[in-house]
Image (spheres, rainbow, N blue to C red):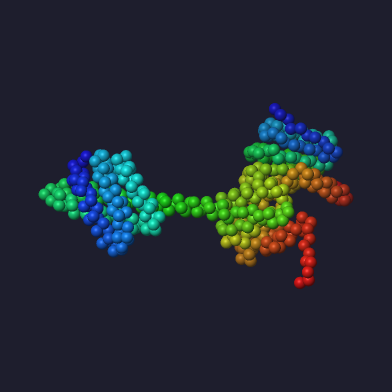
Amino acid sequence: MKPEYVAITEVLADSKAVVREWLVEVSGATGSNRASSSTDAIIAEAGEIARAVHDGLRAEGDVGAFEGAAWERLRGVLESLSRSRAAQGATAGETSGFLLSFKRPLFARLQQHLANEPPMLVASLWAVSSLVDKMAQFTLEVYQRSREDIIKRQQDELLELSTPVIKLWDGVLAVPMIGTLDSGRTQLVMESLLQRIVDTGSELAIIDITGVPAVDTLVAQHLLKTVTAIRLMGADCIISGIRPQIAQTIVHLGIDLQGITTKATLADALSVALKRTGYTVTRTTAA
Amino acid sequence: MTRIPILQMGDCLLVTIQVDLQDRAAVSLQDDLANKIESSGARSVLIDISALEIVDSFIGRMLAGISGIARVLDAATVVVGMQPAVAITLVELGLSLHGVRTALNVERGMRLLRLAGEERALDPDA
């Protein structure tokens, strides 16, 4: 163990007292009564962290190498702290602020302990300061990582939710596209639509783009690819739900939709589809 | 090397690809089909690729070539039963089989060919 760590472990040996001072510091800094509401849980968490720091230093942990094996337990404790705090709705700043306020009691105790050895005091303070900084940084990273996991899971869910293939009529399928069309979405839509065409033997597919906020050349290219693939399979495709603004953009961009049946609304597309499949719809009562 | 058989039914030629198409089999199929159309005077060709699950750029090009040749020899060509994965691959490769008719299954393909034959019978230029 490096000489400047010895003093830190000695200070931390009385973990109960340090934790008490730490929590006073926390409630003073935040001014909230969050600390008092679940004091027992927080005391347990803080005590665990203090002991993990102590054990990490005893296990020859190096403050400069926080990724090392000696800090494994501390990392585990901090990870669960960060996750549980995030689940309780605490911000990343609050969690790291909680850890950073650990410095004050440690500094005060080190100052008492090493009052007669200024050079050793400076080295110890530096070590403690950088260790606590690293701990706070680590909780931020964990917080961010768990947030990114959530975002990714939601993206996947969105992808699955937004691409249903609907059987509209015997031999007619419809896909209401909602949201921006990127290549990943197009691929997914294309695959599920083509598979449904094979499964149901449908000869007509209607792609409704009412829910697509904007059509640029890339989106149009994706649409054209889908249409071509549907045709290769031996079915035909109608694009419906082209809003006036989108029609203008398509023409201004010079996108060539020739040879593709386009309709303004899904109802128009359905009536074309019924005509092609040989159905007529008649009203049985007078309007 | 397995050869793809070409069956004749009336004035229609049937090509059913039931195995994964090897490159050399595809080349010989192209030759065989061209010769067969010429010798039999067939007016229509139906190519069933429902068992074909994997295409690469070469096979994709051969498919486009085979159907193109049949068309040039004045036989109405219909490609039936393309699998979704194959369709997506062909689109990504930029092979849209322009001018080739497609159908979902053999039955619909035959109907398409019959309609094409009737149209041709009505057309005095043909």
Whether residue A274 is visible:
yes
- Is B103 left, or right, of A32 in this rendering? right
Q: Position of residue B104 (x, y in %)?
A: 73, 46
Whether residue A130 is visible:
no
Total labels drawn: 0
Q: Position of residue A74 (x, y in %)?
A: 31, 45
Instruction: Single out the residue that lies furthest toward the front.
Output: A40
Nearer to the camera, A264 or A39: A39
Instruction: Single out the residue that lies furthest toward the bottom.
Output: A287
The residue at the point 78 percent across, 66 percent down is: A283
Nearer to the camera, A55 or B118: A55
Q: Position of residue A180 (x, y in %)?
A: 56, 57
**Does A275 sit above or below residue A3?**
below
- Is A40 left, or right, of B40 in this rendering? left
Q: Position of residue A19 (x, y in %)?
A: 24, 53
**Does B102 sit above or below residue A278?**
above
In the rendered image, the quadrant that contains the N terminus of chain A is top left
The residue at the point 24 percent across, 58 percent down is: A24
In the rendered image, the quadrant that contains the C terminus of chain A is bottom right
The residue at the point 17 percent across, 49 percent down is: A121
Instruction: Single out the residue that lies furthest toward the left.
Output: A116
The residue at the point 87 percent across, 51 percent down is: B122
